[in-house]
Each structure stands twice: as structure tokens, then as C-alpha cells.
Amino acid sequence: MDRMFFYAHSGLRYLVLLAGVLALAYFAFGLVTKRPFDKGGRILGASFAGLLHLQVLLGILVLVTRFYYPALIGHIVMMVLAAVTAQVSMSVNRRRPQPNFVLPLVGVGLAIVFIIGGIMAIGRGVFTTTAL
């Protein structure tokens, strides 16, 4: 069972990064073209934040089913910061009278930096996979 959670957590990372890059590109394009924030932006932002929350949940399951080592503290802190940053930037932007692309762009960009830092905190590369 612990291997299943580990492989799901490890594999979902690529989907989270893909959703983040797509959201980042969409928000940057919307900002550059001065388009109004639309439903596509809300969907991409919510998808990225939701996948990130699922990743955190799987990470918790991995943590309770496997062994602990000190480098995990940095990994956990960075991943929680990424999830909070993504969620807060989308929620605050949605509640604004005139939502725009700036806050989601900054939030997703910062979340991706936190994700990369969290992966590197446990001594792995962003695109490397370990056996266990």
C-alpha cells in the first residue's frame, strides 16, 4: 500500500507541474493581451490549486506509511507554502470586483518556485524518478 501512495505522489508531480505551466502561460498571455479575466482563467487556476491539494494529501499518506527523515521538513514546508499560495491567489482574485491576471500569475509562479524548491529539498531533481 505504501508503494502505491509513493508512486501516485511521485507521478502526480508531473501533472501538477504541467497544470502550473499551462496556467502560468494562460495568465501571462491574458496579461499581455489585456484581456478581461474569464472562465478559462478560473478553471485553470482551480485545476492547478486542486491538483496541488491532492498532491499534498498524497504526500501526507506517504508520510504516515513510510519512514521519516529530516529532509522531509523542508519538503513539507515548501509544498504547504505552494498549496497555500496557489489557493490564496485564486481566492482573493475571484473575490475582487474586477478580477485580473496579475495576482494569479504571481501566485502560480511563486507556487511553482516553491514546488521546485520542495522537490530539491529532498535531494531529487525536478524530472528525476527514484525506485523507492
Image (tube, rainbow, N blue to C red):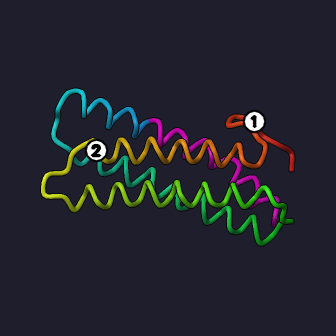
Q: CA distance from mark 1 to mark 2?
A: 31 Å
For the residue pair 6 and 88, the one nearer the viewer reads as 88
In this picture, residue 119 sits left or right of residue 44: right
Q: Which residue is mark 2?
A: 40
Q: Is residue 46 found left or right of 99 in the rendered image?
A: right
Closer to the eye: label 1 or 2: 1
User: Which residue is the site of mark 1?
Assistant: 128
Question: In this rendering, is residue 95 above or below 38?
Answer: below
* Residue 20 in magenta stretch: yes
Q: Residue furthest bottom?
A: 64
**Which amino acid, mark 2?**
Gly
Q: Amino acid at mark 1?
A: Thr
The quadrant of the rendering that contains the N terminus is bottom right
Q: Measuring 61% from the left and 54% from the top, which residue is drawn there? A: 78
Instruction: Specify which label sits upstream in the sequence, 1 or 2.
Output: 2
Q: Is residue 48 above or below residue 126?
A: below
Location of residue 101 by image quarter = top left
Q: Residue at x 33, y 47 (%)?
A: 104
x and y, in percent, of residue 18 in the image: 52, 38
Q: Secondary structure at mark 2?
A: helix
Q: Residues within 10 Å of mark 2 (few under 14, many from 20)?
A: few
Residue 41 lies, in percent from the top left, at: 29, 45
What range is drawn magenta here?
1-21
Where is residue 28 shown, x and y percent of the image? Answer: 32, 32
Q: Is residue 55 magenta?
A: no
- Assign a secondary structure to mark 1: loop
Mark 1 surroundings within 10 Å by alpha-carbon count, few (fewer than 14), some (14 through 19), many (20 or more): few
Residue 76 position in % (x across, y down)? 66, 60
Image-based side of 79 in relation to 130, left or right: left
